[in-house]
Image (tube, helix red, strand yellow):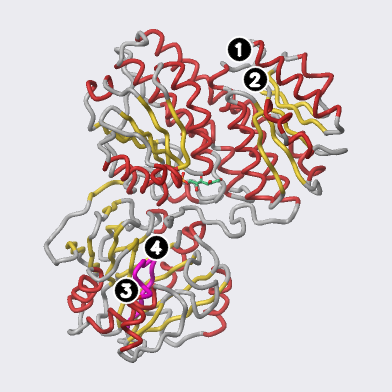
């Protein structure tokens, strides 16, 4: 959710922190703030609104010395406790403004802590849970200096419940930034004569590609020359060192107006990268980290896919292939619902957790519930070093590169491919598919980047159509089989980007209620399966298209090249290349991404940062 940056070194901290925040702004953007230690003084500024508003305030305020300080922290917020106001923006201060704290997550026992502090005479100036951490730190900082601040942080963390990444600086501990984490991400960037802290590596990728991922319940003290990690009790601890294999340009817009446009365009490459090296010469599929034996996988008798939002849709679409290839029952569940309904899980259940960020709290909690019940957990994730893969028994990374736009696009397509690979791997170890059968599917998958490229090359009419739909009251999406989750995904994209009423339906369900929504001119996007795959399926949806058209709908039909049966019923026809039925979502989703992006842009919305949303949802 919130974006967090810290810097200590020989250079002015403010510019580096602001630049880091700019790269993290996708995480949250309803307020922003910085604190810099300069000449034994703590200098801060914070503002509700996007980062640009903070930058303007800094330029106008011209706070003496702030541009020279060489250690500092910065924050972009996605509000949880307390609305997005200047007062609730981070950093929060205490000790006569000599200690500053920023926070991502939720302190669950904050009401109790606040009441205790108020009883001791502390006056609060905000409605946030974070402010109590600032006051606690001030109280626990019994000695000055970097170690005094780190000791105080450890003592405070022992009092906190919930999820948090915290960073603190103090005018009484110059040249140091202290961080802590529980259930929320924090990485260290290892520089030369300087070090960094951030919620994700994109904040410091410009300065270093060497990183250390902090473990659960750890505190880190960074100075210009050192990184010291302990647990909350002060015992020495280690993080996990890793090298970042993409560079700063991957996190830039690269000439596109929006990150989302760039990320849509990157999909062929992202698919190719995710597939790279997955098939060994002997025909075995390669996952990334496997702490499960083949026997464990042979014992699997039930699969649950848990995920949220777009990642959930990728699981829904992949289920068809996984069940077909493995013959193992596969359920797809919203992670936020999973653990509350007491699912039946045991050692022979495989839970597949799909998450682009690897930090989504709902998915993480579902995963932990599954592990508590002794189920095996396999993560499909795009973020190396994040919590979900770390806590899983096996991992398959989607090599989509950084996804900055809040609306997920390339992550979705690569998640689908990753799910297919997991399905093939399971089918293989269980002896259901021969190596040549697996290789044949992998070969089909390897053709998909080219097919997605073909779709992208023909999107101009879709953009034109989108502009004509910008004033529609509502847009409906229908599909059957793997086209149903694609319809849901198309509707989600439109809701989150264009703020329009949009709904996805299984086409067969229309007659059970939703068809009443159709009135004259209502746009209905119809995702049509290949006529070559399941003839019955194809015929059924052609009937559904006729049904909505008979009631006045304006039909936008996504259909395979050569599918002439749909032509008479399509007010607008969007062609996609011929593709095996189970893999079709890889091509049919793309026009829907373009459609939503263009409608949103036409309506004047910020496509990369839709209102009320954040990229990484680290609260339940
Ligand atoms: C929608 C979108 C969200 C995410 C969801 C899960 O475009 O991006 O619905 O898919 O919040 O996020 P991850 O995949 O990071 O767990």
Q: Which residue is mark 2?
A: 529
Is 434 on the left-hand or right-hand side of 241?
right
Which percent across, then down, holds residue 228? 18, 64
The numbered dot on residue 168 is 3
Is 495 on the left-hand or right-hand side of 482?
right
Q: CA distance from mark 3 to mark 4?
A: 15 Å
Q: Which residue is mark 1?
A: 533
Kind of element beneath mark 2: loop
Q: Which label's residue is closer to the chain start, 4 or 1?
A: 4
Q: Which label's residue is closer to the chain start, 3 or 1?
A: 3
Point 49% across, 76% down: residue? 88
Query: From the viewer's perspective, is the residue at label 3 or at label 2 nearer?
Result: 2
Determine whether the beta carbon of the residue marked 4 sits less than 8 angstroms from the nearest atom of ligand 1.
Answer: no
Q: CA distance from mark 2 to mark 4?
A: 42 Å
Q: CA distance from mark 3 to mark 2?
A: 54 Å
Q: Is residue 517 magenta?
A: no
Circles 3, 2 touching at the beta carbon (< 8 Å):
no
Which percent across, then down, holds residue 7? 34, 68
Q: Is residue 106 magenta?
A: yes
Determine whether the beta carbon of the residue marked 2 sits less than 8 angstroms from the nearest atom of ligand 1.
Answer: no
Is 554 on the left-hand or right-hand side of 179?
right
Kind of element beneath mark 4: strand
Q: Quadrant of the C terminus?
A: bottom left
Circles 3, 1 touching at the beta carbon (< 8 Å):
no
Q: CA distance from mark 2 to mark 1?
A: 7 Å
How packed is label 2: few (under 14 Cα within 10 Å), some, or many (20 or more)? many
Q: CA distance from mark 4 to mark 1?
A: 47 Å
Q: Which residue is mark 4?
A: 105
């Amino acid at each position: 959710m919130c974006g967090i940056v810290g810097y200590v070194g020989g250079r002015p901290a403010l510019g580096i922190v602001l630049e880091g925040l700019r790269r993290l702004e996708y995480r949250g953007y309803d307020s922003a703030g910085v604190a810099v230690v300069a000449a034994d003084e703590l200098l801060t500024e914070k503002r509700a609104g996007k980062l640009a508003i903070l930058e303007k305030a800094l330029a106008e305020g011209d706070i003496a010395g702030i541009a020279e300080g060489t250690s500092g922290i910065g924050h972009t917020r996605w509000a949880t406790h307390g609305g997005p106001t200047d007062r609730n923006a981070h950093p929060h201060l205490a000790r006569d403004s000599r200690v500053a704290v920023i926070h991502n997550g939720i302190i669950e026992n904050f009401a109790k802590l606040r009441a205790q502090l108020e009883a001791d005479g502390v006056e609060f100036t905000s409605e946030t849970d974070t402010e109590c951490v600032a006051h606690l730190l001030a109280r626990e900082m019994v000695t000055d200096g970097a170690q005094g601040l780190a000791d105080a942080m450890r003592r405070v963390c022992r009092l906190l419940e919930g999820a948090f990444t915290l960073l603190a600086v103090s005018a009484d501990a110059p040249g140091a930034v202290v961080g802590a984490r529980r259930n929320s991400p924090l990485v260290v960037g290892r520089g030369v004569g300087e070090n960094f802290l951030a919620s994700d590596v994109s904040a410091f990728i410009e300065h270093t590609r060497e990183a250390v991922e902090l473990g659960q319940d750890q505190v880190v003290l960074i100075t210009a020359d050192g990184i010291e990690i302990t647990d909350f009790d002060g015992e020495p601890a280690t993080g996990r060192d890793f090298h970042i294999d993409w560079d700063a340009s991957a996190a830039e817009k690269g000439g596109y107006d929006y990150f989302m446009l760039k990320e849509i365009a990157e999909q062929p490459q992202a698919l190719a990268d995710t597939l790279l090296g997955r098939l060994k010469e002997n025909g075995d599929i390669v996952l990334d980290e496997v702490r499960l034996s083949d026997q464990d996988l042979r014992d699997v008798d039930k699969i649950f896919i848990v995920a949220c939002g777009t990642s959930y849709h990728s699981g829904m679409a992949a289920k068809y292939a996984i069940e077909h290839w493995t013959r193992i029952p596969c359920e797809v569940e919203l992670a936020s619902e999973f653990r509350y309904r007491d699912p039946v899980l045991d050692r022979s259940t495989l839970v597949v957790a799909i998450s682009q960020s690897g930090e989504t709290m709902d998915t993480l909690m579902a995963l932990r519930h599954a592990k508590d019940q002794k189920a095996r957990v396999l993560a499909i994730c795009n973020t190396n070093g994040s919590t979900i893969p770390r806590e899983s028994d096996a991992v398959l990374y989607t090599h989509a590169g950084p996804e900055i736009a809040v609306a997920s696009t390339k992550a979705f397509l690569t998640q689908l491919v990753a799910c297919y690979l997991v399905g093939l791997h399971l089918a293989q170890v269980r002896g259901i598919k021969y190596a040549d059968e697996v290789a044949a599917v992998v070969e089909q998958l390897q053709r998909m980047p080219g097919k997605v490229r073909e779709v992208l090359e023909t999107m101009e009419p879709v953009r034109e159509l989108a502009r004509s739909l910008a004033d529609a009251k509502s847009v409906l999406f229908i599909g059957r089989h793997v086209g149903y989750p694609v319809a849901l995904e198309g509707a989600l994209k439109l809701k989150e980007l264009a703020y329009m009423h949009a709904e996805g339906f299984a086409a067969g369900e229309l007659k059970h209620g939703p068809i009443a929504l159709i009135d004259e001119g209502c746009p209905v996007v119809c995702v049509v399966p290949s006529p070559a795959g399941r003839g019955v399926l194809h015929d059924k949806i052609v009937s559904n298209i006729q049904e909505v058209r008979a009631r006045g709908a304006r039909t936008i039909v996504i259909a395979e090249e050569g599918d002439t049966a749909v032509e008479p019923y399509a007010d607008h026809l969007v062609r996609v290349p011929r593709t095996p039925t189970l893999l079709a979502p890889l091509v049919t989703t793309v026009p829907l991404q373009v459609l939503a992006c263009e409608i949103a842009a036409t309506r004047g919305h910020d496509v990369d940062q839709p209102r009320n949303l954040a990229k990484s949802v680290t609260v339940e």
